[in-house]
Each structure stands twice: as C-alpha cells, then as structure tokens.
Image: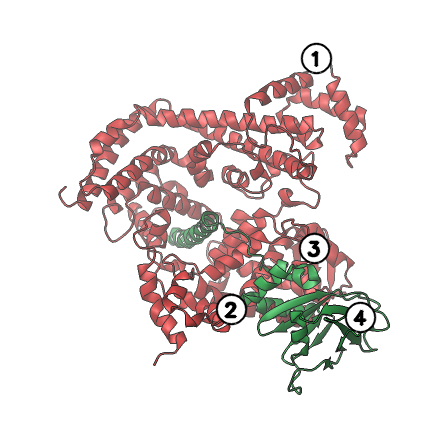
Amino acid sequence: MDKHSKAILSDAGKLFDKLTDANLMRRHLDDAPKQADGLDLHSLWQAAEGKASDTQMQKISQNFMARKQFKAILDTTAMAYQPRQAAASSASDYRHGSAFDIRIKPSAAQDGLVYVQLLFHQKMQLDQDQPSVLVSYRDGIYRQKPLTSIKDQRIQLLWHSDDPMLKDLRDPETELYIK
Amino acid sequence: MLSYHQHIHTLALPLILQSDAGRANRDRALWSTRVARPGNYATLGQFQFSDACGYGQLMSDPGEILSSWAEFRLAPPSEFLLTCLRHIHDATDGYGQAIFSPRTAATLTTMIASRSYGPELYRMTAMIAGASASGLNPGELLLAGRATPARIRQMFSDADRPDALKIEDDQLVFATHQPVWRQAFSRAPLSVALASFLAEALGFDVFLDAYDKLGQNIEASSIKTISNDLSKRLYRFLAEHLPRSSERQITLLLQDYLEQSLSSDAKLSENDITDQIILDFWCEKSLDKEVSLKLYDTCLRAWVTFRRGVVMASQSRFSSADSLTDDEHRLDDLTIDHFYGETDDVSFLEAGPKAFQSSMVLSGDKSSGLKTSYDGLAMPPADRIKMFSNTERDKIELLAYADDQAAALKPSMLRGMVFPLLQNRLTQATRVSKKQPDIDALMAEAAPNPYQDCLEAWKDIQVVALGTARTACQRLIEERQLAGLALLTAMLDDEGKRELTDLMQEAGVSSDQSTLSAENLFDLLENRPAQTALKAILSELKSGARKYRRSGLKEAPADRDELIPWYDGLYLAAGYAEKIAHALDIFLKEIEAMGDQYEDLYRKDQVIFKEQFNRIYKSEHGDG
C-alpha cells in the first residue's frame, strides 16, 4: 500500500475504535435502562429552587456526589448564606449572620409551638427577590422549609417544637441558605 | 495493618475477576482485550467510600458492600460514568419535558465514549465564555430550561453582551478573534450537553470556576487555555472511568488482514473490504483461540464498522495531519459529524415538529437514513407509535446497523441474517450438552432457500413501513393536523400537489399556519369531489389505515394532555417509517439485480458454513 493508503488505514482503525466505543456505550445504556434517580444537576437545580419534596431532599442527603453538587448549586444561587458558626460553642436560640439573624422563641400562647424569626439586615435588597425557601445542612443532611413573605425585614414562621430543623438552627455546625 | 482504602483496592481485582464469569456475547468479544485496572474503580475512593464512612456502613461485611457496588463488574465502563450519561439522557425541566433531544443526548454519549470531545470542548468553552462575559447566570444557561437553539439564542440576545460578542446569521460571533470565530446556535444544545456532562462528572464547582474565569477574558488565547485545562481534566476522568480503546486487539487484526490482502502498490478504498474478505477472515480467525471471533456476526459487524471507518477516513478533508493534536481533532470531528448534523433537530423544537417540512430532513446525519430512522423510532416521542412489531424490527436490525454499507455488502447481509441464528443454536446446544452438536442435522432443518425468505421478509417490512406511515398520516388528517398534510404532500404526484396548493390558497393558509385557515383547509378537503386525485388518495389512506391497528395508530388518546405528544409521535414516526421504506426499496432493487445468484450463493455458503461450524465446534470438543 502507498503512504496515503497507510494513513487511511491508520485513521480507519482509530475511527473503528471510536465508532465501536460509541456503539457499545449506547447499547450499554439501552440494555441496562435505569429509572431516573432524580439526582441529576437539573433536578438538583429545581430542588435548590425549593421545588423538591422531602423525599427528594432525603435522597440528596444520602448521596455523597449529590450533596456536593447541591452545595455548589446553593452556593451560587442562594440569596443569603450563613456558614458554620466557628466562634459559637453550644446550641443557642439566637444565631447571628452577616446577612440575616435567626431567633427562636417559644410561643406564649400555644404549647409545643415555637416562633422562628429570620431577621434580615437592612443592607439586603429584598425588594428584588422574594425568598422562598430556607435550607439547612448539618451532618450530611439537607432540610428545607418554605418561607412566608417578608415584613419589616423579617420573616416569622411557626413550627412545632419537635421539628428536626429546629435542632439544625440551634446547632452552630449547621450551614444555612436562603433561596 | 491495611487501611480501608487499601483494603478496597486489594479486594477489587479478585472480585472483578470472579464477577460476571462465563458470560459471552458480541460485546464481550469487543471488550475482551480490556483488562480491569485499579484505575477504573477510582470512584470507590472518590465517592462511595466517603458515603460508606458517613453512614457507618463499614460496620457491615465489607465483602457484601463491595459486591453490591456496580463498579465491580468485569465489563467497563464505571457505573459513575454511566450515571453521568444517564443524567443527561434523563434530565427534565420543571414541567417534566426533556432538557436534551434524544439526538443531542446520544451524540454526547458518542462523544464521551469515543473520546471525540476535543473540538466540541472548544466550542463549549467559547460559548460559556460568551455567556459569562454577558452576565448570564451559569445555572440558568445550563439547568433552568430545555436546551434548544432558540432558547439559548434568546438568552444571548437578551443579555448585555460585550462589544466583541455579536449575533449574526444565527451564529455567535467573537469579532476580535483572529480569524473571527463563529459558532452556530444550532449546535449550542450539544455544547450545553457537554457542559452539563462536565459539571456532572467533574463537579459543578469546577464548572463554575471555569465559568468565572472565562467571563473575565473572551480572547481566543484565554478560551484555548481554559479549554485545554478542561480537556486535561476530562481526559484524566475518562482514564479512570472508561477503558482505553487502543487496547482493542480486533482493530489490529482487521488492519493487518486488510493490508495483507492488498498488493504493495494498491490504493486503499472501502471497496477493498469485500464479502469475500469478511468470510475468509471469519473462517481463519474463528479457529484462533487467542481471539474471541468465533461468531460470524461479530466479524461481520466489525468489518461493517471498519468499512465505515475507511469511508470516513477517505473522505477526510486532509490527506495527512499537521500535528498529532490536529490529527486527533480531525478524527473527532469526523466521528461527531457522522452522528450530529448542522441542521436543527426537528424532533425537538420549542413548539413540536415543524409542519410542512419534508420528512426527509428529519435527521441531521449524512447516511442512508435507515439507522437514524430505526433508532428514531425507539426514541420519544416516536416510540409511542408502534410502527413495527419486535419481530419486524429484528429483521431489519442488521440492515440498520450496516446502514450505508449494506448495499455494498449484499451477500454478507444475507449471510448475517441466516447463519448467526444457526450459530446461536449451536452455541446454546454446546452449553447444555458436552457432546458435539449435530451440525448436519441443524443445517438440514433450515428452509430450502433462506436468502429468498429474507428478501420476502424485507419486502413485507417495506410494505408495513409504508402502511404504518400512511396510517399515521391518516390519523393526523382525521385530527385536522397540518402535519398530516405535510406527510401527505410527500405521497402526492404532481397533479395532487397542484390540487393541494390551490386548495391551500383558497383556504388562505399562510406561512403562519393559523388555526382558522387550517380549519378552512380541512373543510375544503372533506368537500372535494370524489373523482379528484386528492380525494382518491385520501380515500386510499382511509381504507389502508384499517389494516394497521397497532398501538398508537388506532385512535387518539383519551387524555387530552397526551394529544400533542401523540401528534408529534405520529409525525416523526411516519417520517422515519417512510425513510425506512425508501432505504429498503433501494436496497431491495440492488439485491434483486443479482437475479437468481442468491440461490447459488446460499448453496455454496451452506457448504462453507457447515464445514466451518464443524471445525469450530469440533475443536471445542476435542475430537468430538
């Protein structure tokens, strides 16, 4: 064979490998179809928008890669963030942050209920984006709560005193996101 | 004492070798030269090990945990890579609509599996550089909606773009690059798919980091630097999760065999890969215990793919590459261009398929269309319409696989339809009995002229393809969908087309295809005099549709939400079926030109295959 033909033969071999790899992978995916796990980036994005069910949040929490990806999405999309409270040493009913504070106060009127107040600092531009969800992350577990509208730079929520998210809010190790 | 990480890597190889033992199939032969390596299982260390630690699973039996991980399979690639690809295929928006078209998702799979991402990675990097510099939110671009050319173009159009970034003729233009860099929005979905894959595989944080850097400088040098960096990262990722194709022994066997068959001054072309070479190769290599090429079907498909490789390589724009990098990119381009055209993906537009568009533009590929149409029928939304039964699909699967190579390898196609079935029975017989199977008896059971039977079967399927396409057209017309008339146009002769054009003018159907004009048009159609050409074909469609009461072709779905996807499915499925009928027609005409030769051919082939089966299975059972 001449030089040109040898070059074609060599290229044909490489293309054969590429086409075969492509065919095998396609068949591999077709032959072993799996139900969508709901942990793709698009689903995580929707979850970060507050559109996930508690089951979905649980699934995210149980998968290392999904947790990592979800955190990256929240980091880029959250309106406000509170990192772990490095200086705090124990659980507290008041949590200070650079963008917002959290105050937990038992309801005087109703036993077993507590008020959770999100106190936004004046510098927040809340007129542009209405926050919709509060996400907590502690010990590898994400939890979320829908938010009501802001009045006077604050959101007030009424929760049961045994709500697991209360423990998150009190724990200085918890990270918080507002979306 | 070993740490748990060390334990995992120590345990991995024996488990890999134990698992999945004894399974032999066509793919296995092609994967066979790939040896499981610790690098392929890095996901354990990277991800799942941390999970296991986090959830206290290590208190359980490590062997049990390890065996449940999908990474411990003999056949690569890693489960993590497959999950990343599945995420692209499965991604949906907030309304449950697919983010990526089947063609885009399939091309991305091809790109990653064949490591042909080089040129697309540059395009993707340029696109995200432009997006970042225009202030687009990275998540909005990648994750917030369907990846269609129109949506991405709109995002760029609405953004506050830097002066150096323009939109001209449906292209994103980097005006300060030397030469000016232009990329078509029609290709943007593939760039978004690749970016999403990178974010899935390498991490969203890695993508965001690149996005931020790219926004600071959209000059060519900056884009190239970051593109190269991402390319290296992806290369390293695939090194861990995808086996090297260069380890494939069969490639060298095919190259050597072809080279030896040619004279020293011969010029190589695809025509050198003949039916005889394929048969001779199988006869020789099927007895070689060092390679897994016992099955004729494996050899045939390998040669078909290799022949396609020769065609593609011969058509390459450059006779020799300037450098290794350019050479690799040239082949990458050839591979991706084979699967992904420049045209819009009409199966995946913002508002469903375009009406009045010829079904012949349904695919963007440059092949005969048989393969694209065959695959298209299995993908949404066409897959909801049963144009072919499973048996019918099986009977044209090989032709679809061979696609544009089928006509040049007619005897091989006939052999591939008949003898692999017999060989499968022989293989099964050897599994259940230690005695050598009775090959003579098995061959005697075959029909008197199976090649003739194949021809008849293909003819029947061609009739079915046309019949189901016409039925789909009829259903659309019954539903007063203009897409039905688009399909009808392709079936009309000149007189019918003139008649339809006159009617459309009378009904006032304009380019915007308003509902009102469409209703007028269908009213006019219904009231046509019986003796007109148009009415005649409409009656023909109506009566023909009674024969094909298959799933999706019978009647409109009761659920109104299902109507639009059903219309889209009918339109696309009809187009694909028409293409299959057309490709079969061409192939059948070619094969009929052989005259009665195929009867002689079968008689000769029967002798050759019988002898070869005897050799193969005799050698497997010693002296019997």
Q: Quickly name the residue at label 1.
A: B530
Q: Which mark is in front, 2 or 4?
A: 4
Could you tell me which quadrant the N terminus of chain B lies in? bottom left
Tell me how far mark 2 sits from mark 4, CA to CA: 47 Å
Q: Is B44 rendered above or below residue B256?
A: below
Q: What amino acid type is highlighted by mark number 3? A: Ile
What is the crowding at mark 2: few (fewer than 14 residues within 10 Å), some, or many (at least 20)? few
Colour chain A is painted in:
green
Tell me how far mark 3 sits from mark 4, CA to CA: 36 Å
Q: Quickly name the residue at label 2.
A: B232
Q: Secondary structure at mark 4?
A: strand
Q: Nearer the viewer, residue B208 or B110?
A: B208
**Quarter of the rendering containing residue B467:** top right
C-beta proximity under 8 Å, tags 2 and 4: no
Q: Quickly name the residue at label 3.
A: B152
Give whichever of discs 2 and 1 has the lower sequence position: 2
